[in-house]
């Protein structure tokens, strides 16, 4: 929980730098939004829980995971590359099928 809070605070204190680094990684961020959580009755644990829920729903948690730098083994790289390739092929096949359906509709077949 503390590492998430530290990463979020670094993101929130340097928003322009983090957005630029995200753009460099070819990920798009449409709008920068800060997360505000009220601490009620001095209950910090509850506030952290709320913050974590808000982070998950807003997508900041995914951005943090993408920015984490760690060594990736070659076997992991191969698995990720294969998954990305399969996803790309599936989307191309779907696009081809949709195009064929639309062409048939337009031609009245």
Image (cartoon, helix red, strand yellow):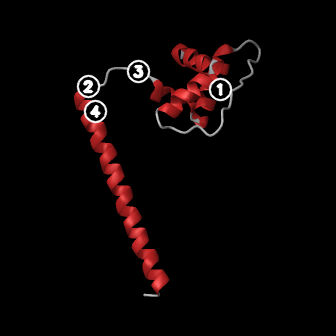
Say which element carries label 1. helix
User: Crowdedness of circle 1 by 10 Å Cα count: few (<14), some, many (20+)?
Assistant: some
As displayed, is residue 71 above or below residue 53? above
Name the side, left or right, on which 59 lies relative to 82: right
Q: Residue at the far left: name it.
A: 75
Where does label 1 land, which residue?
Answer: 50
Q: CA distance from mark 4 to mark 2?
A: 6 Å
Do the residues under discs 4 and 2 have CB atoms within 8 angstroms?
yes
Q: CA distance from mark 4 to mark 1?
A: 34 Å
Name the side, left or right, on which 54 lies relative to 24: right
Where does label 2 land, which residue?
Answer: 73
Task: Residue at 68% x, 32% y: name it.
Answer: 33
Closer to the chain start, of discs 4 and 1, is: 1
Locate the N terminus and report the quarter of the image it occupies. Answer: top right
Q: Whole-percent x and y of residue 69? A: 41, 21
Q: Nearer the viewer, mark 4 or mark 1?
A: 4
As displayed, is residue 77 above or below residue 103? above
Q: Nearer the viewer, mark 1 or mark 2?
A: 2
Closer to the chain start, of discs 1 and 3, is: 1
Name the side, left or right, on which 63 lies relative to 35: left
Q: CA distance from mark 1 to mark 3?
A: 26 Å
Do the residues under discs 2 and 3 have CB atoms within 8 angstroms?
no
Task: Residue at 61% x, 36% y: name it.
Answer: 58
Where does label 4 land, which residue?
Answer: 77
Where does label 3 land, which residue?
Answer: 69
Q: Nearer the viewer, mark 1 or mark 3?
A: 3
Q: Whole-percent x and y of residue 52? A: 59, 26
Q: CA distance from mark 2 to mark 3?
A: 13 Å
Q: CA distance from mark 4 to mark 3?
A: 14 Å
Do the residues under discs 1 and 3 have CB atoms within 8 angstroms?
no
Q: Whole-percent x and y of residue 73? A: 26, 25
């Amino acid at each position: 929980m503390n590492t998430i809070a530290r990463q979020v605070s670094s993101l929130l204190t340097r928003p322009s730098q983090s957005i630029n680094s995200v753009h460099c990684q070819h990920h798009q961020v449409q709008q920068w939004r800060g997360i505000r959580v009220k601490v009620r009755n001095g209950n910090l644990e509850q506030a952290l829980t709320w913050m974590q829920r808000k982070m998950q729903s807003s997508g900041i948690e995914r951005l943090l995971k993408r920015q984490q730098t760690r060594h990736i083994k070659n076997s992991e790289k191969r698995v990720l590359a294969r998954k990305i390739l399969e996803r790309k092929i599936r989307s191309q096949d779907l696009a081809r099928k949709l195009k064929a359906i639309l062409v048939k509709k337009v031609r009245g077949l």
